[in-house]
Image (tube, rainbow, N blue to C red):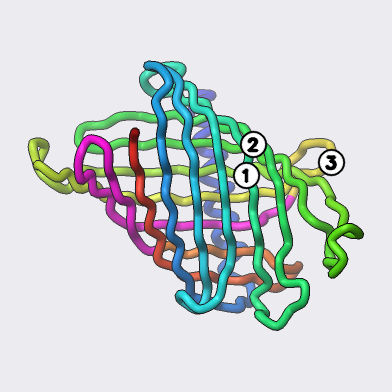
Amino acid sequence: MRIKLKIGLVLVIIIGSLKFSFAQEYNKVNGIWNAAFLDFKLSNKMSLRTEVHLRTISYFSVWNQHLFRPQLSYKASKNVTWRGGYTYLRNFDQDVTSDPRIRNEHNIWEQVQFTLPLKKASFSTWIRLEHRYQEEIPLKKDKSLRSFDFSSRIRFRLTFQKLLSKMDAKIPVNLVLYNEIFTLMSPSGIPFKFNQNWTFLGLRIKLNEKLSINSGFQKNTILKSSDNYLKNRLWNTILFYKF
């Protein structure tokens, strides 16, 4: 009964957030996101991962973000994985004439992921808590005068994968669908405000035991102010490589 109640609560939050965002006014951009995830195995349970993300809007013409995200992973059991790490972000103003244009962010985060395997498919979910140090706005040209403010954010992602190719295919192909909700947290640590929603539909192709590619369409809905949202339609491609 408790499990059913928790699942029902999560679904209500997801549906409510989507309905709320659909009722607002939007600014729209188009983007390209490219990333590489590099994994270094330390033991049967421990590994290091380094993520590098390069993101643009107006297709390839305007920088949106640069991310560098090293992390440590611990596989507690077959279906449970813990991760923790650091992220450095360079956030670019959409207006290329802005001066200064780049707002830096440093954050430390913790994450737990649960996977439910099914026949030729799987459900997984992860929850990530981010502790964010962002440069205060308005940005100052003299970097020595800049200061950082602190906030926290919680992210919840639900992913479904289904094998599309034959079980014994030389190059397995999976359908991938996920939805992720970002919620801002109050200083007392209580989630209180919608921040973003990401929806992704694409394919995961396993080229060999070391190399996989995830590629597909993603739509992000981002809260910019109380009655204004940014909608980013983008093509997202991630290369996964195991050393």
In depth, the one of 35 and 155 nearer the eye is 35
Position in image of residue 143 (x %, y %): 84, 61
Q: Tell me what residue is drawn at x 72 percent, y 57 percent.
A: 104
- Residue 46: name its quadrant: top left
Which numbered disc, 1 or 3, marks the residue closer to the eye?
1
Residue occupying image coordinates x 48% and y 22%: 74
In which quadrant of the rendered view does residue 155 lie? top right
Q: Position of residue 56 (x, y in %)?
A: 52, 69
Q: Are marks 2 and 1 in contact (CB under 8 Å)?
A: yes
Q: Is any part of residue 219 visible from this angle? A: yes
Seen in the picture, residue 34 relative to 72 is either above or below; the reply is below
Query: Closer to the N terminus: mark 2 or mark 1?
Result: 1
**In this rendering, is residue 220 above or below 128?**
below
On screen, residue 174 versus residue 27, left or right, reads: left
Residue 149 locus on image (x, y percent): 84, 50
Image quarter of residue 115: top left
**Span highlighted in magenta in the image:** 193-217
